[in-house]
Image (cartoon, grey):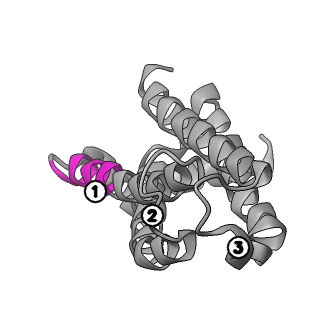
């Protein structure tokens, strides 16, 4: 048995994994918290992405929107990460071979790279373009990539239950 599969089986068979999986309420509550946290993450990110695409809030500077939404985004991310890890813990043996779960992890890695690249390139000069109705093409490309990747993550997350 490969090491990663063995670790997944250990998590799955642990007392915490078993408790979450077999509880009448724990798994459902954690899953509900996870969905609400993802809604917070994606909702706040979408506001910024749609602003960079010039669809919403054009009179407001990009940095002003970012400052307003980032605390909520990071809070949602922390809660979704923790709740997602608990869900994984409860069913890690099943998740190991689930193609939708693997796709979701790949998309999560890509969606993490997107802002890293964005903030280390085009966002460094945000004060030059943040008040323009039309943002630079690289900012728009990052926004489209973000919206696309987050949509894929949500779809892959929902598909986990069907594989």
Residue 119 shown left or right of residue 25 in the figure: right
How far apart are the two marked residues, 1 and 2, measured between alpha carbons?
34 Å
Residue ID at (62%, 40%): 149
Residue ID at (42%, 60%): 44
Q: Is residue 14 visible?
A: no
Residue pointed to by mark 2 = 59
Q: Earlier in the sequence, mark 2 or mark 3?
A: 2
Residue at disc 1, secondary structure:
helix
Task: Say whether marks 3 and 1 touch (CB < 8 Å).
Answer: no
Residue pointed to by mark 1 = 33
Residue at disc 2, secondary structure:
loop
Q: Earlier in the sequence, mark 3 or mark 1?
A: 1
Residue 139 shown left or right of residue 32 in the figure: right
Q: Is 21 colored magenta in this rendering?
A: no
Q: Residues within 10 Å of mark 1 (few under 14, many from 20)?
A: some
Residue ID at (46%, 70%): 65
Q: Height in image: 11 above or below 153?
A: below
Q: Position of residue 125 (x, y in %)?
A: 78, 75
Q: Residues within 10 Å of mark 3 (few under 14, many from 20)?
A: some
Task: Say whether marks 1 and 2 touch (CB < 8 Å).
Answer: no
Residue pointed to by mark 3 = 126
The segment highlighted magenta reads 25-36
Q: Quadrant of the N terminus?
A: top right
């Amino acid at each position: 048995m490969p090491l990663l599969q063995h670790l997944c089986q250990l998590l799955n068979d642990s007392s915490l994994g078993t408790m979450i999986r077999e509880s009448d309420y724990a798994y459902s509550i954690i899953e509900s918290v996870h969905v609400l946290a993802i809604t917070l993450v994606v909702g706040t990110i979408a506001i910024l992405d749609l602003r960079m695409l010039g669809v919403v809030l054009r009179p407001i500077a990009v940095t002003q929107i970012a400052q307003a939404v980032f605390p909520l985004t990071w809070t949602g991310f922390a809660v979704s990460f923790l709740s997602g890890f608990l869900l994984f813990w409860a069913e890690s043996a099943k998740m190991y071979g689930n193609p939708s779960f693997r796709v979701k992890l790949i998309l999560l890695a890509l969606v993490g790279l997107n802002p890293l690249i964005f903030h280390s390139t085009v966002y460094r000069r945000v004060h030059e373009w943040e008040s323009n109705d039309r943002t630079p093409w690289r900012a728009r490309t990052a926004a489209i990539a973000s919206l696309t990747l987050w949509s894929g993550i949500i779809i892959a997350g929902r598909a986990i239950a069907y594989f």
